[in-house]
Image (cartoon, rainbow, N blue to C red):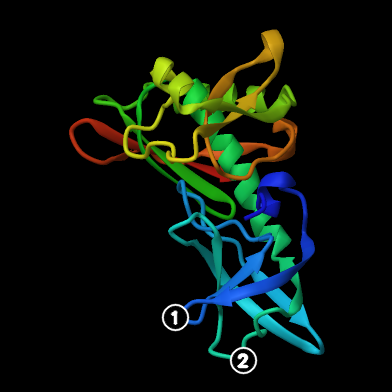
Amino acid sequence: MTEPLYRQDAYAREAQSVVVGHTDEGGILMEPSLFYPTGGGQPGDSGWLEWDTRRLSIATSVKAQDGTSILVPAEPEALPPKGAHVMQVLDWERRHKHMRVHTALHLLSVVVPLPVTGGAVGAGTGRLDFKMPEPPQDIQLLEDSLNRLIDRDLQVTEGWISEEELDANPSLVKTMSVQPPRGRGRIRLVRIGTGTEQVDLQPCGGTHVARTGEIGSLRIGKVQNKGKQNRRMSIILD
């Protein structure tokens, strides 16, 4: 299995690939895959496939047991046959919003330096749940701090460490509910800022923008009580 295209280049909007199989449920397996599969709180990509004179809408993408993407058709239509050369095309506007929100949530975990108990990425909105017994005193202060980080236009890059290195640095993992996937010997890290400008470094398999300035300004929504120890903070892209 080759490295998925969404991992090689999060900005790739379309790509030619080959159908390598189908699932019993009617899903499509592509090699290589452009569509990000649901995981880590980020929804699967949507879009469509084109081959010959046909076009098939894709509602979402989910993850197979081996980590590959399974493309889920929006309607029960004829599928491209195994071996077919197919053009994969993303709903780019939706994917790009996921990228902006996902990167913004990493920054939210910087301005709210508390353990994260859950999270979700949406197309224009997102949320993190924090282990936070008391609500924050000044939401506007947090919102201003978040937008200042965005305005610094920090570079967003990735790197890899071994599972052993992660075990030696457990503080890299901010999420209490979801642990980085293991079994392949290495863990992907997403870094925001470089050198003395670095503000965040944590394991993540999702797609992100290249610089924080691409996120644009955002607002923090209402803080919700999710139990004695948990508070939910939402962000909304302007």
Asked where in the image residue 101 lies, by quadrant, the reply is top right
Residue marked by disc 2: 78
Q: Residue furthest left?
A: 228
Which x, y percent locates residue 144?
58, 24
Pick whichever, 77 or 107, lies toward us.
Answer: 77
Which x, y percent locates residue 74?
56, 80
Asked where in the image residue 20 lies, by quadrant, the reply is bottom right
Determine the residue positioned at 70% across, 11% down: 195
Pick whichever, 199 or 38, lies toward us.
Answer: 38
Residue 28 is left or right of residue 127, and the answer is: right
Is residue 115 visible from the viewing direction of this image? yes
Element type at marker 1?
loop
Kind of residue at disc 1: Glu
Pick whichever, 215 or 36, lies toward us.
Answer: 36
Image vertical order of residue 36 relative to residue 89, above or below: above
Please rate how many residues cluster around mark 1, counting C-alpha atoms within 10 Å: few if below 14, some from 14 to 19, many from 20. Answer: few
Element type at marker 2?
loop
Residue marked by disc 1: 25
Determine the residue positioned at 43% across, 40% down: 183
